[in-house]
Image (tube, rainbow, N blue to C red):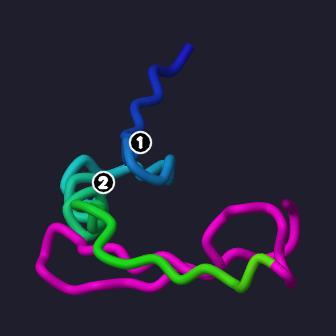
Amino acid sequence: MKTVRHYVCETCGTVCADKAKAAERQKAHHAPDRIVGARYAPTSGDRTGYPQTLEVLMDDGKTATYKRTGGR
């Protein structure tokens, strides 16, 4: 019987055979720090109450904009 060792990025779940590659992958992910902006549609067109877009400040100081698609 063989022992198989692998490493998993805790952020995205990617499996790597090499511990260093898994650590490198994990460090490459940016985590959200806080929401810095939200845009809502007029209530006449969207009665969900949820924002259409969110602007998120990431841990590296850059912002990312996320847009709601479908669903609610």
Relative vertical location of residue 4 with respect to residue 37 in this rendering, above or below: above
* In the foreground, 62 or 53: 53
Q: Amino acid at mark 2?
A: Ala
40 on left or right of 46: left
Could you say whether the residue bearing mark 1 is in a helix, strand or loop?
strand
Dot 2 or dot 1: first in sequence order is: 1
**Split into 4 quadrants, where in the image is the N terminus?**
top right
- Residue holding disc 2: 22
Q: Provide residue 43's location: percent of width, then percent of height.
A: 77, 76
Relative vertical location of residue 71 with respect to residue 53 in this rendering, above or below: above
42 on left or right of 21: right
Residue 64 sits inside the magenta stretch:
yes
CB-based contact (under 8 Å), mark 2 and mark 1: yes
Near mark 1 (Cα within 10 A), the count class, few <14, some 14-19 or many ≥20, is: some
How many marks on residues? 2
**Split into 4 quadrants, where in the image is the C terminus?**
bottom right
Q: Provide residue 28's location: percent of width, then percent of height.
A: 25, 70
Residue 5 sits inside the magenta stretch:
no
Spatial separation of the CA atoms under disc 2 and disc 1: 6 Å
Q: Residue at x 30, y 52 (%)?
A: 18
* In the foreground, 72 or 28: 72
Relative vertical location of residue 36 with respect to residue 27 in this rendering, above or below: below
Q: Provide residue 12's location: percent of width, then percent of height.
A: 47, 53
- Residue holding disc 1: 8
Q: Residue at x 33, y 66 (%)?
A: 35
Could you say whether the residue bearing mark 2 is in a helix, strand or loop?
helix
Q: Amino acid at mark 1?
A: Val
The extreme front residue here reads 44
57 on left or right of 61: right
Magenta-colored span: 44-72
Near mark 2 (Cα within 10 A), the count class, few <14, some 14-19 or many ≥20, is: many
